Image: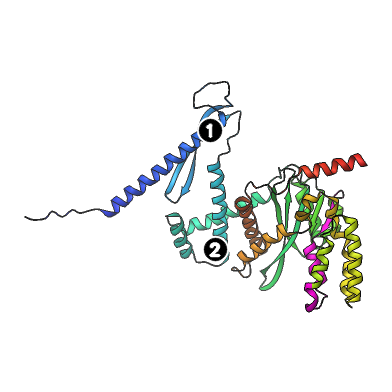
Amino acid sequence: MSEKIVQLNEEAIKGQIEELVRGSVEETLNELLEAEAEKLTQAARYERNEQRQGCRSGHYNRNLTTTSGDVTLKVPKLKGISFETAIIERYRRRESSVEEALIEMYLAGVSVRRVEDITEALWGNKVSPSTISELNKKAYVHIEDWRNRPLQGGRYPYVYVDGIYLRRNWGGEFENVAILVAIAVNEDGYREVLGAAEGMKEDKASWVSFFQWLRSRGLDGVKLVVGDKRLGMLEAVGEVFPEAKYQRCTVHFYRNVFSVTPRSKVKLVAKMLKAIHAQESKKAAREKAKAVVEELRSMKLKEAAKKVEDGIEETLTYCDFPSEHWTRIRTNNVIERLNREIRRRTRVVGSFPDGNSVLMLVCARLRHVAGTQWGNKKYMNMKHLEATFDEASIAG
């Protein structure tokens, strides 16, 4: 008895399975969209009830690339109510991450063939060289649009600013380029990246231009600017935001004092400085600072004593604000962490071909971190700030 040999077309079966999975993913995502719309309107399609919010107005199609292939989303249109779906938001975050990856690979000198292999491994289909080129152009446009977007977070009481230096190749010579970065906490207590711009020499003119650009896009209600004592920055704050106060980052202040402190004494001096900013009021901090200055002089650390005496007042501005916010507003740590991440990501590039390439990659990273790591996590309870200024106005 002869055995029957069953022949299988593996490619055809693989294709059918992939199509089955893709179709299942597409169906599931569209069901989720319908469920979101139903929950938002508080009514199923065509249903009429007293709780209904807004009404349906058909659908529009939107393509979404998934690991299972390209799917078509049928996004519900709503009248009388906006429809912000979590699915589309996740897509935007993924899109921003893809943009950053493509720019980083391009700037790092990764070959087009290697990029093709990477995209095939990540998304299941190979991206052509012309597509890679177009995606880079598109990514730059998207990032530039994001960089110049109107600021719609209302008022921004706390603004953190800093400059980050990266290397660029300018006419065959290498030089540093400063990227000025601003992050804020809005009146609802959420962090937001306000913007980044090339600062050239990071002088007063650069900072004034940067602050005016932020103001023209909607930056308003600034009560405190937190930053290092950089060249011209303090003067620029007073010129563009005359109502705002300035807080010198205590960490940067400590580093400045350490620069004239013998290495063997740094740990002791650090404890002395931290004791100043651990006081319960500005008055107590000033008294502690005087004691520290005297102690430093007795230790024969005259230069360190002078730096503390001359600079301590501008590090105590945070005391004029709610004590619940002190640990968040006396340092520039929120932006310093981002800068470390940017440096880590740009180290692979080495030197950039131009200032705009630096700016695009920095913005891509800022946008990605803000969209994924910060999410909807509240950074501060701003009711404390409202209460503090209400008390001040009554006292005034």
Question: Which region of the structure is painted magenta?
Answer: 242-267
- Residue 387 in the image, given as x and y percentages of width and height: 82, 41
Q: Which mark is residue 105?
A: 2
Closer to the camera, 272 or 84? 272
Q: Residues within 10 Å of mark 1 (few under 14, many from 20)?
A: many
Q: From what the image shows, is residue 81 above or below residue 87?
A: above
Pick whichever of labels 2 and 1 is earlier in the sequence. 1
Q: How many marks?
A: 2
**On the image, numbered disc 1 is attached to which residue?**
37
Q: Secondary structure at mark 2?
A: helix
Closer to the camera, 243 or 387? 387
For the C terminus, the quadrant is: top right
Query: Mark 1 is on which residue type?
Result: Ala
- Residue 183 in the image, given as x and y percentages of width and height: 72, 53
Query: Mark 2 is on which residue type?
Result: Met
Foreground mark, 2 or 1, reads 1
Q: Is residue 268 left or right of residue 134?
A: right
- Residue 287 in the image, given as x and y percentages of width and height: 91, 61
For the N terminus, the quadrant is: bottom left
- Residue 283 in the image, given as x and y percentages of width and height: 91, 56
Q: Secondary structure at mark 1?
A: helix
Q: Is residue 112 left or right of residue 52?
A: left
Q: Residues within 10 Å of mark 2 (few under 14, many from 20)?
A: some
